[in-house]
Image (tube, rainbow, N blue to C red):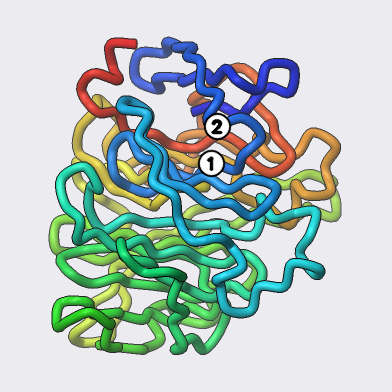
Amino acid sequence: MLAEKEENADTREFFDVVKGITYTMNFPELARKLCLGVGIPGWLFTVDADGNMNLFHLNSRSIIELPHMDTLKGFDLDKHRGYLECYVDKAVLSSDPHTTDGYILMINQGGPRTLAYWKPGKKGFISVETRKAAYADVTWHDGQFYGVDVRGNVIVFDFRGGMEPTIGKVFQGVPSESICGMRLYIVHSSGELFVITRDGIETNPETKLYGVEEFIVGKVDVDNESYEKVDDLGNRSLFLGFSASLAVEQYGCKANHIYFTDDCTLTFDSSEKGGGKDMGVYNLFDNTIEPHYAGESYHRFSPPIWIFSTPNFSDL
């Protein structure tokens, strides 16, 4: 989904990276809101300038009202007023709210960079009090959330035993020498857990520009607490950015490539255009980058994100 256009906030464009086609639809429900992909087809997490948070489904236009931002531990309205739309920088759903009431939403608070989760029926978000450092990303698989923090620690939150999570593991998942100045992502795919580092998130002092220089993919073994660099993902493609980090083996995407959008918030925050510059497709075989969208799509706090369509969405 491309970034909102200021002159027409009610309309959104959706670019199909496989077909190279742009679809346009009217979505006043998304106007002037931060939108994050949550990893479940069709669903988005949204935040407005007043701290109201929702889950929104693109096809059914269902809206699930979430507890207000002021239920988040550590949130300070006076301190964060003026950029509430940027306060949450990651949101991940465990399952589809259309098919079960037993889903869990985990978010990463962009201010204190702590995790908090919500379940239907809860009046507020519940903070996860286990971090060693600020969280970078989180993913879900088979009853457990897996988080990675900015120091490369991997933390496992086990929801299989009851209402509240137990902490299964906390260990150094990525070598500390591999993460300086990097952005980290975590993805679970086909029984394997991957942590990815993204270089080039800060402005280069020589070129005065920022942008991906390299991605490094590592496979993390939770049981043995080990890390192994990976150069071949087989038929899988990775999708990274302001959406739940995902690995896919369908949609006609290029295998062993990383599709990425701009999530370098601290860098593009000072840019007049906002975020949207650093996008492309990274080839893990030869470390080359090619564009996936030839046009421009910038926004000061909500740049393009990945949307994985439900069947009828492809017929727009």
Looking at the image, tell me whether mark 1 or mark 2 is earlier in sequence order.
2
Q: Looking at this view, is 212 or 62 the one in front?
A: 62
Which residue is at 23% across, 79% downward?
Answer: 163
Number of other residues with Cα within 10 Å of mark 2, as a class: few under 14, some 14 to 19, many 20 or more: many
Q: Where does the image place residue 251, in percent across and percent down from the top left?
A: 24, 27
In the rendered image of this protein, does residue 52 appear above or below residue 227?
above
Instruction: Name the foreground residue: 287 vs 103.
Output: 103
Q: Viewer-proximal residue, 180 or 104?
A: 104
**Residue corresponding to mark 1:** 35
Inspect this view and state whether residue 283 appears: no
Label 2, on which residue? 30
Relative to 62, say whether 87 is above or below.
below
On the image, the x and y values in percent for residue 168 come to 25, 88
SS for tag 1? strand
Label 1, residues with CA under 10 Å away: few <14, some 14-19, many ≥20: many
Q: Which mark is residue 295?
A: none
Residue depicted at 15% across the width and 77% down the height: 160
- Residue 222 image point, x, y percent: 23, 80
Circle 1 or circle 2, nearest the eye:
2
Q: Is residue 204 left or right of residue 63?
A: right
